[in-house]
Amino acid sequence: MKCYVVDAFSNEIFKGNPAAVCILDQWVSDELMQKIAQENNLSETAFAIKSNQDRFELRWFYPRG
């Protein structure tokens, strides 16, 4: 899994809202995604899987379930 911290809702570094984005090869359990979100402790952690050449499936979790 690759995981990045991005500045959401902004084109400038250190502006907007920090959020984690995790790229998965396959879905993991909701419990594991919730624990990862808690570990990141950001306003949200998004999980994405590439579903075809130009589309992604997306789920997101907050640090508190």
Image (cartoon, rainbow, N blue to C red):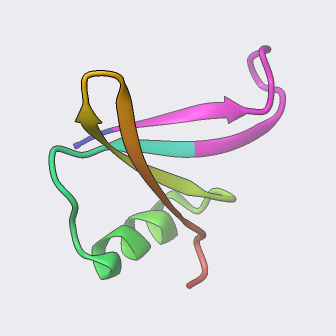
Q: Is residue 31 left or right of residue 17?
A: left
Q: Position of residue 18 (x, y in %)?
A: 69, 41
Q: Position of residue 53 (x, y in %)?
A: 25, 22
On-image quarter of the N terminus:
top left
Residue ID at (53%, 36%): 5
* Residue 26 to residue 25: above or below: below
Q: Is residue 37 left or right of residue 17?
A: left
Q: Is residue 6 left or right of residue 21?
A: right
Q: Position of residue 22 (x, y in %)?
A: 38, 44
Which residue extends farthest top? 12
Magenta stretch holds residue 7: yes
**Range of the magenta residues?**
3-19
On-image quarter of the C terminus:
bottom right
* Residue 61 to residue 21: above or below: below
Q: Position of residue 34 (x, y in %)?
A: 42, 74
* Residue 5 to residue 54: above or below: below
Of 48 and 65, the residue lying toward us: 48
Which residue extends farthest left? 25
Number of marks present in the image shown: 0
Magenta stretch holds residue 4: yes
Residue ID at (79%, 14%): 12
Report which quarter residue 8 is drawn in.
top right
Of 54 and 9, the residue lying toward us: 54
Residue ID at (24%, 31%): 52
Residue ID at (24%, 46%): 24
